[in-house]
Amino acid sequence: MMNAYFELMLWPLLAALVLTGIHVYLGLHVVTRGVIFVDLALAQVAALGMAIGVLLGWEVDSIQMYFLALGFTFLGAILFAYTRSLTRSVSQEAIIGIVYAVSAALMIILFSKSAEGADHLNHLLVGSILFVTPGIVFQTLLLYSAIGIFHWVYRRQFMLSSEISGASDHQKVNLKVWDFLFYMTFGFVVTSSVKIAGVFLVFSFLIIPATAALIFVRGVRNRLFFGWAFGFVGSLLGMVFSVMLDIPTGASIVATFGVLLIITGVVKGLWVYGNK
């Protein structure tokens, strides 16, 4: 029985580890920028592109589908990079929310014209990480490693663009250029992640471990390690619960993340209270 569980969860768990590695890092940027729902919006834009591909008769794993979804995500990246400096009267979160709502509505409309629309809609929302293949895991690892190296080389510029708070900071970096590069690389990640894990799980990988890290520890390095550990443990427990209770894997991982976040908050509160 244990061998069967191990064989079933090996590649999904490795996929979750790969997703956690890049999403926790990007999540720290997203929280710093104050655009919490940007990942959800870009994931939904990618899903809209996939919905169009499905109606065109393209296979979900085809190269045409990938580049169509990527193209839609790039359009969203350009929009978010451009509107960041134009949001004095309207917050960027409002624009992000509008993009998400309109993209979701269009996707539902498109799938309403398909006989298998409900199945496709469910797949794009909750994914199928439990059935990920070794080939997809390796391809995703290579892509995310390249993006991680790019962010490491230019980490100063990316951090400054995320932390800009005044006009004088604009002299240090070209805000629009580095915003676009951030959202562009973000788009590559989201497009690949949605195919594996679905919109909701991708959002959870981005926000929940990073939020737990921000609550519990200080310093970028410590937060990265804490977030990675949180994401791995949450993914493992979520998959175990999913197999044992025969419940959807994506929803199980998200729910487990939520419980772990509550536990993290309680432990932090008790620690602060005990040191008063």
Image (cartoon, rainbow, N blue to C red):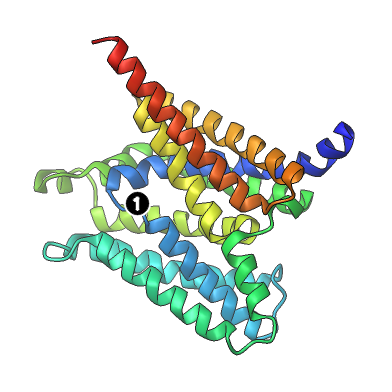
Considering only vertical position in the picture, is 149 above or below 133?
above
* Quadrant housing the C terminus: top left
Q: Residue furthest front?
A: 245
Quadrant of res 158: top left
- How far across and how far down the image is residue 55, in percent? 63, 85
Q: How many labels does the image show?
A: 1
Quadrant of res 90: bottom left
Please state if 129 lies on the left or on the right of 76 as rendered.
right
- How far across and how far down the image is residue 16, in percent? 63, 43
What's the residue at 62%, 52% (across, down)?
250
Foreground of the two, 140 or 107: 107
What's the residue at 60%, 66% (across, down)?
124
Foreground of the two, 142 or 131: 131
Please state if 273 lies on the left or on the right of 199 as rendered.
left
**SS class, disc 1:** loop
Which kind of residue does numbered mark 1 sit on?
Ile
- How far across and how far down the image is residue 8, in percent? 81, 44
* Quadrant housing the N terminus: top right
Q: Residue furthest bottom?
A: 113
Considering only vertical position in the picture, is 161 above or below 42?
above
Neighbourhood count class around disc 1 (C-alpha, 10 Å): few under 14, some 14–19, many 20 upward: some
The residue wearing badge 1 is: 36
Considering only vertical position in the picture, is 131 above or below 265?
below
